[in-house]
Image: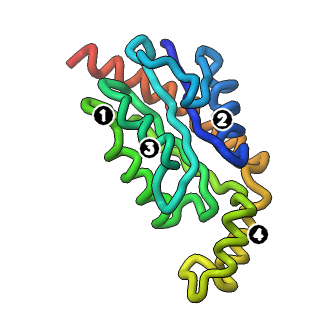
């Protein structure tokens, strides 16, 4: 089985998760999206990681996702909100809609990550910001500590599960 991990990272959050997934897979290659091979047809499973901007994959990765087609894909994302929040879940749907034709999503993994300090300063100055206020400041402060060791352990366990899931899907497709 040949795997590839492709990621986009600004603050280093997504890169940390990508590196842990890569390390766990063992039989993979890893690239930032700008340096990824153009032809991904030789890979059995493609792990795609990105950070969120306005509830969707970052702009560069958004364009990259549109070039992926005929692939089995695992999506992973980092963001400044809780990993199971509506914001995070909706972002997976947005990423999935950006993929090219005939892609099958095998799994998704979300992880809280520290927020770019420039973004925090910007958000502090927005009156009535629905993401700001006391709850927002508390969430931003909590995000400063992520991804942490537990997040990395969760990412490793997730990668292991995706390998097993892919193998089961391949066996099923072969038999039916």
Q: Which residue is mark 2?
A: 156
Q: Which residue is mark 1?
A: 100
| Cα gap from disc 3 to disc 2, whole angstroms | 25 Å
Q: Answer yes or no: do the residues labelled 3 and 4 have beta carbons within 8 Å?
A: no
Q: Is residue 96 above or below residue 129?
A: above
Which percent across, then down, holds residue 121? 72, 71
| Mark closer to the chain start, 2 or 1 | 1
Q: Quadrant of residue 17?
A: top right
Which residue appears at 61% of the width and 23% of the height?
A: 30
Q: In this rendered view, identify the residue nearer to me: 40 or 24.
A: 40
Which percent across, then down, holds residue 123? 64, 74
Q: Is residue 26 above or below residue 145?
A: above
Label 4 or label 2, whichever lies nearer to me, is 4
Q: Which residue is mark 3?
A: 62
| Mark closer to the chain start, 4 or 2 | 4
| Mark closer to the chain start, 3 or 4 | 3
Coloration mode: rainbow
| Cα gap from disc 4 to disc 1, whole angstroms | 36 Å
| Mark closer to the chain start, 3 or 1 | 3
**Local secondary structure at mark 2:** helix
Which percent across, then down, holds residue 157? 63, 37
């Amino acid at each position: 089985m040949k795997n590839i991990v492709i990621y986009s990272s600004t603050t280093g959050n997504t890169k940390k998760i990508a590196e842990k997934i890569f390390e766990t897979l063992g039989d993979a290659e890893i690239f930032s999206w700008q340096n990824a091979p153009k032809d991904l047809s030789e890979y059995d499973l493609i792990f795609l990681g990105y950070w969120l901007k306005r509830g969707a994959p970052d702009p560069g990765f958004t364009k990259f996702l549109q070039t992926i087609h005929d692939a089995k894909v695992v999506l992973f994302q980092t963001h400044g909100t809780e990993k199971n929040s509506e914001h995070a879940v909706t972002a997976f749907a947005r990423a999935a809609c950006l993929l090219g034709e005939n892609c099958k999503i095998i799994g998704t993994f979300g992880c809280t990550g520290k927020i770019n300090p420039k973004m925090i300063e910007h958000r502090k100055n927005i009156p009535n910001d629905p993401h700001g206020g006391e709850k927002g400041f508390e969430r931003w402060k909590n995000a400063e500590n992520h991804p942490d060791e537990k997040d990395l352990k969760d990412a490793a366990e997730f990668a292991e599960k995706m390998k097993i899931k892919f193998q089961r899907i391949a066996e099923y497709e072969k038999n039916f």
